[in-house]
Amino acid sequence: MSDDWGKRTKLVHHGARRSQYGEVAEAIYLTQGFVYPDAEAAEARFLQSGADEFIYARYGNPTVAVFEERIAALEGTEDAFATASGMAAVSGALTAMLRAGDHVVSSRALFGSCLYVLEEVLTRYGVVVTFVDGTDLDQWRAALRPDTKAVFLETISNPTLEVIDLKSVAELAHGVGALVVVDNVFATPVFSRAVALGADVIIYSATKHIDGQGRALGGVICGTRDFIRKTVEPFMKHTGGALSPFNAWIMLNGLTTIDLRVRAQAASAQAIAQALDADPRLARVIYPGLENHPQHALARAQMDGFGTVLALDLKGGKEAAFRFLNALQVAVISNNLGDARSIVTHPATTTHQRLPDDLKQTLGITPGLIRLSVGLEDTADLIADLRRGLDMI
Ligand SMILES: *Cc1c(COP(=O)(O)O)cnc(C)c1O
């Protein structure tokens, strides 16, 4: 059965249900609710709904359920809960599990909105958060306390692609009984070994590689059945961050090709990083697949691939960066990642604009830094495009 299937087979078929019409593609159940055959059935379903029994789309929906089962099978967790966006997943998972007085240790190098949730939102409700340099195990060790309920980290940080030693952080966290919550977008569900390394809760913005074509927002929280159904579901179903059935259908279609896409994009990222690594106009090319990356060995040990994003640090600061961006003809200037289109971003003036200058410096977000999310175009065209940009600075 399904459990013995390989990854690609699961990505195409796992969790599929067919209606009486026997449709080939998954049906989109665009309905807010469900009709009960009689009053007794309604009463029984509100008391306890069985498998494939639904009440209201904010609680669950057949199309969304297929997506949840398929992504859980891919990640290797018992269960998953789909959300309206990646941030609904991050804020939902953390808010569902924490209460006033709880302590959280988090890596400082976070996606801007994750940093906002930890620094500005959770603290408002009495959660105490300690930020550490995620790559420094001594800082994790020093920050963990007997009352630490969770640690939060991005396994590969955005945008400077530092790799955190998930296995060691998980061992330290489990030593004080804390749950390990991982925002795993950059590692991607294709390359993730997060469960084996000790992560308890794994979160994806499905907006990124899962859709992979820049169409829709979505997110997902993966974890044990107990955590998903007893902690996450009650919170999410009453607070409203449900994934729409239409977006679940888009994400299901994304999953059928994600393995092929992400592997092709990562191979292209590796080739681009190698082609540009020695370019004298660049202070640094940052990609975990390059041997000169400070955590290259760690990245190799904890992932099945090095990801689809790289960073270029241009000599000549913001002026050089803008000239470079404005000269590109293939890669587009935007801020998504994991898309089929290659996307270039200038973090210092866009995604990370809000950060104070000293924190930007600590995180390595220099004025010359460009983030490149590698798409599915021909690698040779991308290298030529990036060289055209470099020629303009
Ligand atoms: C994009 C992203 C998010 C947020 O996802 P949305 O779908 O945009 O809400 C969270 N974490 C990381 C690392 C991301 O890249």
Image (spheres, rainbow, N blue to C red):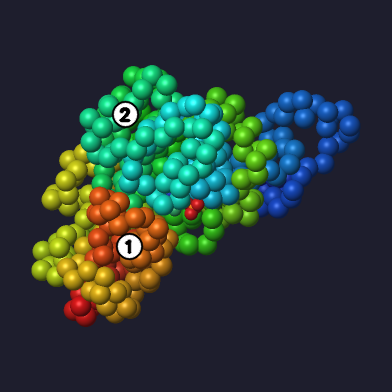
Residue 47 x %, y %:
77, 25
Q: Residue at the location (71% across, 53% down)?
A: 30
* Crowd band around label 2 with a 10 angstrom C-alpha radius: few (<14), some (14–19), many (20+): some
From the top left corner, tell me how far across and down residue 222 is, in percent. 49, 36
Can residue 3 be spotted in the picture?
no
Vertical comparison of 388 with 215: above or below? below
Secondary structure under tag 2 reads: helix
Q: Which residue is mark 1?
A: 348
The residue at the point 34 percent across, 55 percent down is 356
* 25 with respect to 182 (left or right): right
Residue 227 percent location from the top left of the image: 53, 27
Say which residue label 2 marks.
143
Going by the numbered disc 2, the residue's amino acid type is Ala
Left or right: residue 320 versus residue 48 is left
In the depicted structure, whether residue 360 falls above or below residue 165:
below
Question: Within the image, what quadrant is residue 173 found in?
Answer: top left
Q: Position of residue 343 (x, y in %)?
A: 37, 66
What amino acid is labelled 1 in the image?
A: Ala
Q: Can the viewer see residue 226?
A: yes
Which quarter of the picture shows residue 282?
bottom left
The structure residue drawn at horizontal position 48% and vertical position 62%, both measured from the top left corner, is 214
Residue 71 vertical placement versus 390 (above, below): above
Residue 145 placement, left or right of 73: left
Label 2 near ligand 1 (CB < 8 Å): no
How far apart are labels 2 and 1 at the CA level? 29 Å
